[in-house]
Image: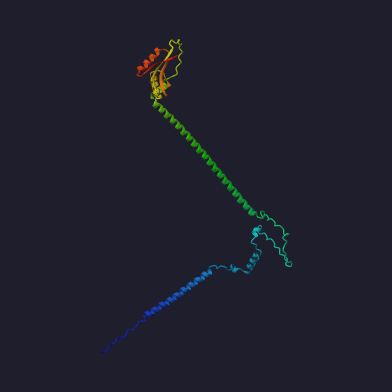
């Protein structure tokens, strides 16, 4: 069989034309962007001042001549030499014909002291005086403030010391009063009967006129009698016994005696000049439930 040939399809040129159009468009856009960047750089360079350039480009010839004349005689140290506007000192030039000679060190004049330029600067002097006056005022104000602060501190310290002393005095007085009250309570607790007797005696006892002394009869007996209501080893017990006798209306006293190296406290009534009076007092003591003994002492 014979082979059948199919007709070849025509190749389309549309993609190739599209690619060429895109490339051309990109080229044109690149040129436009480059021109814009170049224009921006040119504008920036013309607007921004460049360093190390002469600023007086726009001056006229007359202005330039005046500026050169002004700068010709300008002295940068004119403000340090005197008042404003004063002419700079003339510089003496050595004659050109004469050769320069070295001065003799022996004949060289001594260095002159620096001239006092205080009078040549009234404005500077005024400023310095004002600064000094201001500094003195500030120092005086600071010293006065420090002095006031010190006075206030001393006054505060004195007030605190006085308050502390007053507080200590009050505390001491209170402590003494408490100690005294405590001692009184202790005494009252150790001798309740004596405290009761003393309180009643202090309330009811009034000063009575002293009785007229009775004429004493001649002693009929050569002895003096005592009624001993007890002998105790403790002073507290002796005080309690004396208080009981005081409640009965009998006046007793306590005497001390050493016996076998120990102190004995004796409660006695008397002295009585007769044995009958002593026996009556002893009977009264025994009648109130207390032991009593008759003691005879030679006159």
Residue placed most toward the observer, 165 or 102: 102
Residue projecting furthest to the front: 260
**Percent from the top left, x then y, of residue 156?**
51, 40
Q: In the drawing, does residue 39 fall left or right of residue 194?
A: right
Relative to 7, does residue 112 appear above or below in the rendering?
above
Q: Report the coloring of the rendering.
A: rainbow
Quadrant in the picture for residue 145: top right
| Figure quadrant of the N terminus | bottom left
Relative to 236, does residue 159 appear above or below in the rendering?
below
Relative to 53, does residue 156 appear above or below in the rendering?
above
* Residue drawn at the location 57% of the way across and 45% of the way down: 143
Say how many tags the image has: 0
* Residue drawn at the location 64% of the way across and 58% of the way down: 80
Quadrant in the picture for residue 98: bottom right
Residue placed most toward the observer, 52 or 38: 52
Residue placed most toward the observer, 125 or 153: 153
* Residue drawn at the location 63% of the way across and 68% of the way down: 64
**Percent from the top left, x then y, of residue 174?**
45, 32
Q: In the drawing, does residue 259 fall left or right of residue 92?
A: left
| Figure quadrant of the C terminus | top left
Residue projecting furthest to the left: 1
**Percent from the top left, x then y, of residue 132?**
61, 50
* Residue drawn at the location 40% of the way across and 28% of the way down: 186
Relative to 136, does residue 21 appear above or below in the rendering?
below
């Amino acid at each position: 069989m014979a082979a059948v040939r199919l007709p070849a399809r025509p190749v389309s040129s549309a993609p190739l034309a599209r690619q060429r159009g895109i490339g051309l468009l990109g080229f044109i856009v690149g040129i436009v962007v480059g021109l814009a960047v170049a224009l921006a750089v040119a504008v920036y360079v013309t607007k921004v001042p460049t360093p190390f350039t002469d600023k007086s480009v726009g001056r006229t010839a007359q202005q330039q001549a005046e500026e050169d004349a002004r700068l010709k005689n300008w002295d940068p140290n004119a403000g340090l030499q005197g008042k404003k506007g004063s002419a700079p000192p003339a510089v003496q030039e050595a004659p050109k014909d004469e050769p320069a000679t070295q001065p003799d060190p022996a004949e060289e004049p001594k260095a002159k002291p620096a001239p006092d330029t205080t009078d040549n600067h009234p404005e500077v002097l005024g400023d310095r005086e004002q600064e000094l006056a201001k500094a003195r005022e500030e120092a005086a104000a600071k010293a006065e403030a420090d002095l006031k602060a010190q006075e206030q501190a001393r006054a505060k310290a004195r007030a605190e010391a006085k308050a502390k002393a007053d507080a200590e005095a009050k505390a001491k007085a209170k402590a003494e009063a408490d100690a005294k009250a405590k001692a009184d309570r202790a005494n009252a607790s150790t001798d309740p009967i004596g405290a009761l007797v003393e309180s009643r005696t202090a309330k009811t006892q009034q000063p009575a006129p002293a009785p007229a002394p009775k004429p004493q009869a001649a002693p009929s007996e050569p002895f003096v009698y005592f009624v001993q209501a007890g002998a105790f080893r403790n002073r507290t017990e002796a005080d309690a016994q004396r208080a009981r006798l005081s409640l009965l209306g009998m006046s007793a006293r306590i005497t001390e005696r050493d016996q076998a190296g120990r102190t004995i406290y004796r409660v006695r009534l008397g002295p009585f000049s007769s044995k009958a009076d002593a026996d009556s007092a002893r009977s009264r003591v025994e009648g109130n439930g207390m032991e009593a003994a008759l003691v005879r002492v030679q006159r």
